[in-house]
Image: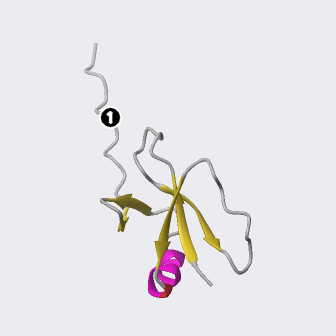
Amino acid sequence: MSYYAYYRLDLSSGPRVIGWYDDSVNGNLPADGYLLSVTLDQWDARMTNPSGWAVEDGQLVEWIPPPPPAPPPPP
């Protein structure tokens, strides 16, 4: 059994994890992105914030969203 974080490099938000796969449950892994093999501890930790992960230098890291854009100056 293997666990994977599925991510894409072409997103404007960077290489965020956009899906999680357990090949013992779903053998149809996506082909249009990238899969990072993750440990059981990382697999379990994903549930703290399933959308809050990214891949950086081949490692699973917490995704920190960029700050919102500054408001326009007053007229």
Magenta stretch contains residue 26: no
User: The disc labelled 1 sits on which kind of residue?
Assistant: Pro
Quadrant of the image occupied by residue 63: bottom left
Q: Quadrant of the C terminus?
A: top left
65 up-or-down from 10: above or below: below
Give percent across and percent down for residue 28: 73, 64
Quadrant of the image occupied by residue 16: bottom left
Q: Residue furthest left?
A: 73
Magenta stretch contains residue 42: yes
Within 10 angstroms of label 1, few (less than 14), some, or many (20 or more) residues? few
Q: Residue at x 49, y 72 (%)?
A: 37
* Magenta region: 41-48
In the image, is 12 to the left or to the right of 50? left
In the image, is 8 to the left or to the right of 70? right
Q: Residue at x 33, y 46 (%)?
A: 66
33 up-or-down from 52: above or below: above
9 up-or-down from 48: above or below: above
Residue to which mark 1 is pinned: 69
Give percent across and percent down for residue 44: 52, 84
Secondary structure under badge 1? loop
In the image, is 51 to the left or to the right of 55? right
Q: Main secondary structure of the magenta part?
A: helix
Q: Residue at x 31, y 29 (%)?
A: 71
Q: Residue at x 37, y 52 (%)?
A: 65
